[in-house]
Amino acid sequence: MRTALVQVASPAGEPVDERRRRVGDMVAGAAGADLVVLPELWLPGYFAFGSYADLAEPLDGDTVTAAREWARGLGCHLHMGSVLERDSDGRLYNTAVLIGPDGDVVHTYRKIHVFGYRSREAELLTPGAQIGTVATRLGRLGTTTCYDLRFPELFRALVDAGAESVVVCSAWPAARLAHWRLFTSCRAVEEQVVLIACNAVGEQADGVRLAGHSRIVDPWGEVLVEAGEDEGVTFCDIDTAVIEAARTEFPVLADRRLVSATTATREA
């Protein structure tokens, strides 16, 4: 199954309409892929916290509408990364959106673990509360966003919900590139999934440089592809049969045993 990771830079000062058109051209360059993936909050730029209120939009706004046309034009599944969603009550979410080949939105996910370390995301955005999976050409797909990588229980919940592949859209800083590589590999191996991780690149607000190095890791921990630090499209052909093969040959998920936490006490 052909997958395309589209690394996007979000430089300060670029008009959002121009960025939307530019990213649309990049997505068009991924023609032939069955799944195209964009990074987290590429339209505003993740670190442009002062613009969040102005750039948030409903899920039928300009950005999702444009992405639906991109997916329809390519006839592929498009994980458009995440958008700043404003709901009907005015709350803001970091919402990942998956669009089907016919241009319909088939899955959304509001980021559960909003980030607070040297970030205003936790201050400005409402955490999501639900997960789910959806059937695609890559099997049953789950989706997470950036900081979620540090919470393995979320990925296990997606596997319990049937996930065979998991997409991670991200704006992961270059300062923690080693963690990016570590966690994407760990989550793929421990959950026996194909982990498809698309990260942003370039310098954003406050001088934060993003790591890039979008990558795809199979259930054995093999890195099928890893991009560099620049904008562009990286293709990878995935044999989804590796998921069932890994789970059959090494049935770690079937061997899981859950126990209740207890507090041991003893007299001195």
Image (cartoon, rainbow, N blue to C red):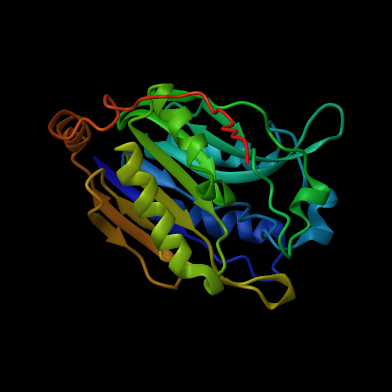
Q: How many marks?
A: 0
Which of the pair 166/42 is nearer the observer?
Answer: 166
| In this picture, residue 124 sits left or right of residue 222 | right
Residue 257, image x and y in percent?
A: 36, 25
Q: Residue at x 49, y 58 (%)?
A: 199
Residue 23 position (above or below residue 165): below
Give above or below for 40 relative to 89: below
| Residue at (67% x, 60% y) in the render | 45
Of the 4 image quadrants, the one containing the C terminus is top right
Q: Residue at x 46, y 36 (%)?
A: 155
**25 vs 162, nearest the viewer:** 162
Give the x, y percent position of residue 145: 55, 45
Residue at the extreme bottom of the image, as rendered: 207
| Location of residue 97 in the rendering, given as x and y in whole percent from the top left corner | 56, 36
Left/right placement of residue 52 relative to residue 251 reads right
Report which quarter residue 254 is drawn in.
Answer: top left
Q: Quadrant of residue 246?
A: top left
Query: In this view of the protein, can residue 3 be seen by the observer?
Result: yes
Q: Nearer the viewer, residue 151 or 7?
A: 151
As drawn, 257 above or below 236: above
Relative to 56, 83 lies left or right: left
User: Which quadrant, please, contains the N terminus?
Assistant: top left
Q: Is residue 70 something that shows in the picture?
A: no
Residue 144 image position (x, y, % from top left): 52, 40
| Residue at the image position 38 percent from the left and 71 percent from the top | 228
Q: Nearer the viewer, residue 181 or 268?
A: 268
The part of the image, by quadrant, that contains residue 163 is top left
